[in-house]
Amino acid sequence: MRSRYTAFVLDDAAYVLRTWHPQTRPESVEADPGLRWTGLDVLDASGGGLFDAEGVVEFRAHYRDGGRPGDMRERSRFVRHDGQWVYWGPILTGGALANH
């Protein structure tokens, strides 16, 4: 999670895409030139241990957009793929998780 946040801060689209599960990964990610990420708070985490196949991370990412502060909050699902942890996608409230 923290490495993906850092990749967003550095506009490292290749890393963001490389750490996204191939079944849910978009074709590309575009940086927003007016957006600057300013901080990350990990609010909760479950799973993701040595013997787990998936984990969940809830976070709040802070940013400045055109000079105005803001934040985004997400519960994210991560899964093991080819031995590596990758981002599956957000967990939508009220809905079931997609199977991988």
Image (spheres, helix red, strand yellow):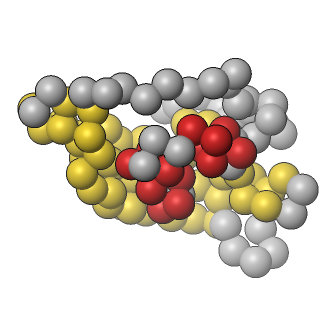
Along the line of sight, the residue nearer the viewer: 60 or 93: 60
* Residue 54 placement: quadrant: bottom right
Q: Which of the pair 81/66 is nearer the observer?
A: 66
Question: To which quarter of the image does residue 6 belong?
Answer: bottom left
Q: Position of residue 28 (x, y in %)?
A: 63, 24
Horizontally, residue 22 falls left or right of residue 49, namely right
Residue at x 32%, y 60% (from the top left corner): 41
Q: In the depicted view, which residue is nearer to us: 14 or 62?
A: 14
Q: Is 63 located above or below residue 66 in the figure?
A: below
Residue at 31%, 27% (x, y): give it. 33
- Residue at the location (46% across, 41% down)? 11
Q: Name the residue at the right extreme.
A: 82
Q: Is residue 51 visible?
A: yes
Name the one closer to the observer, 77 or 37.
Answer: 37
Give the x, y percent position of residue 34: 25, 27
Q: Is residue 24 above or below residue 27?
A: below
Pick the quarter of the image with the C terminus: top right
Which residue of the protein is positioned furthest toward the left in this rendering?
A: 68
Figure quadrant of residue 97: top right
Residue 75 visible in this rendered orientation of the protein: no
Residue 90 in the image: state x and y as whole percent.
Answer: 55, 36
Residue 29 place in picture, x, y as percent: 56, 27
